[in-house]
Image (cartoon, helix red, strand yellow):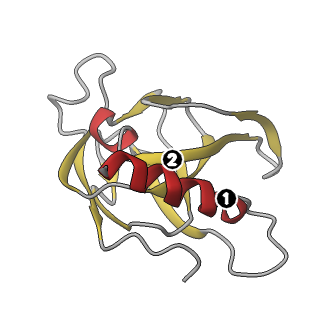
C-alpha cells in the first residue's frame, strides 16, 4: 500500500521534475568541493542536509590535483535523479547523464551538477571517496534527508 502511495505521488509530481518550469522556483543550489587545491582529502562541506520533495542542484567541483569519487549508495537509493550535467571550464554543459547514479568521479579542476529530488528520509548516510586510500585519509562525510514529502512548495 505504501508503494502505491509513492507511485501515485511520483506520477502527479512528474510535471514538477523540470528545471525549466515556467512557473515555480529553480533548483536549490548546494555546492561541495571534493578535495582542496593543496591536496587535502576532504569534502567541503562534509555534512550535507536536503529536504524531501525539494528540487536540488548539487554542484560538485574538484579544485585538487587528484581525481575524487563522490560515492554514496545510501543517498542514491533515496532520491530521484533528474540528470547530471558535466560542465566545461566555461560553465556550459558538455554532456548530460540520466538514470540511477551511485558514484561520480570528478577529475581535477572539473565540475559536475547533479539535479535531484530527495524522496525518502535518511540520517547519517555515508559519503566517501573510494579512490586509492582517500577514505582512510579523511575523505568522508554524511548526508541527511529530512522533512515531509511536499512537492511544489
Q: Position of residue 127 (x, y in %)?
A: 27, 42
Q: Position of residue 20 (x, y in %)?
A: 81, 65
Q: Nearer the viewer, residue 116 or 94?
A: 116
Q: Is residue 145 above or below residue 97?
A: below
Which residue is pictured at 33% across the width and 73% down the height?
148
Residue 62 seen in render: no
Left/right placement of residue 3 relative to residue 22 reads: left
**Mark 1 surroundings within 10 Å by alpha-carbon count, few (fewer than 14), some (14 through 19), many (20 or more):** many
Q: Nearer the viewer, residue 113 or 54?
A: 54
Would you name the residue on which mark 2 appears?
A: 80
Query: What secondary structure is marked by label 1?
Result: loop
Q: CA distance from mark 1 to mark 2?
A: 9 Å
Query: What secondary structure is marked by label 2?
Result: strand
Q: Nearer the viewer, residue 106 or 83?
A: 83
Would you name the residue on which mark 1 appears?
A: 17
* Residue sticking out furthest to the top: 132
Left/right placement of residue 117 relative to residue 109 reads: left
Which residue is pictured at 30% across the width and 73% down the height?
147
Q: Is residue 67 above or below residue 2?
A: above
* Residue sticking out furthest to the front: 1
Left/right placement of residue 22 relative to residue 52 reads: right
Check if mark 1's residue and mark 2's residue have beta carbons within 8 Å: yes
Which of the 4 image quarters holds residue 144?
A: bottom left
Q: Quadrant of the C terminus?
A: bottom right
Which residue is pictured at 39% across the width and 39% down the height?
76
Q: Position of residue 59 (x, y in %)?
A: 56, 54
Residue 52 seen in render: yes
Amino acid at each position: 500500500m505504501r508503494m502505491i502511495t509513492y507511485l501515485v505521488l511520483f506520477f502527479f509530481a512528474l510535471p514538477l521534475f523540470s528545471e525549466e518550469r515556467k512557473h515555480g522556483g529553480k533548483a536549490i543550489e548546494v555546492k561541495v568541493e571534493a578535495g582542496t587545491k593543496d591536496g587535502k582529502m576532504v569534502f567541503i562541506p562534509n555534512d550535507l542536509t536536503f529536504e524531501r520533495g525539494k528540487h536540488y542542484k548539487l554542484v560538485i567541483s574538484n579544485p585538487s590535483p587528484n581525481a575524487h569519487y563522490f560515492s554514496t549508495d545510501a543517498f542514491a537509493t533515496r532520491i530521484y535523479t533528474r540528470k547530471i550535467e558535466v560542465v566545461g571550464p566555461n560553465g556550459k554543459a558538455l554532456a548530460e547523464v540520466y538514470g540511477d547514479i551511485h558514484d561520480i568521479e570528478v577529475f581535477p579542476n572539473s565540475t559536475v551538477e547533479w539535479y535531484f529530488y530527495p524522496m525518502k528520509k535518511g540520517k547519517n548516510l555515508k559519503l566517501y571517496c573510494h579512490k586509492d586510500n582517500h577514505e582512510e585519509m579523511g575523505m568522508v562525510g554524511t548526508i541527511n534527508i529530512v522533512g515531509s514529502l511536499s512537492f511544489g512548495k
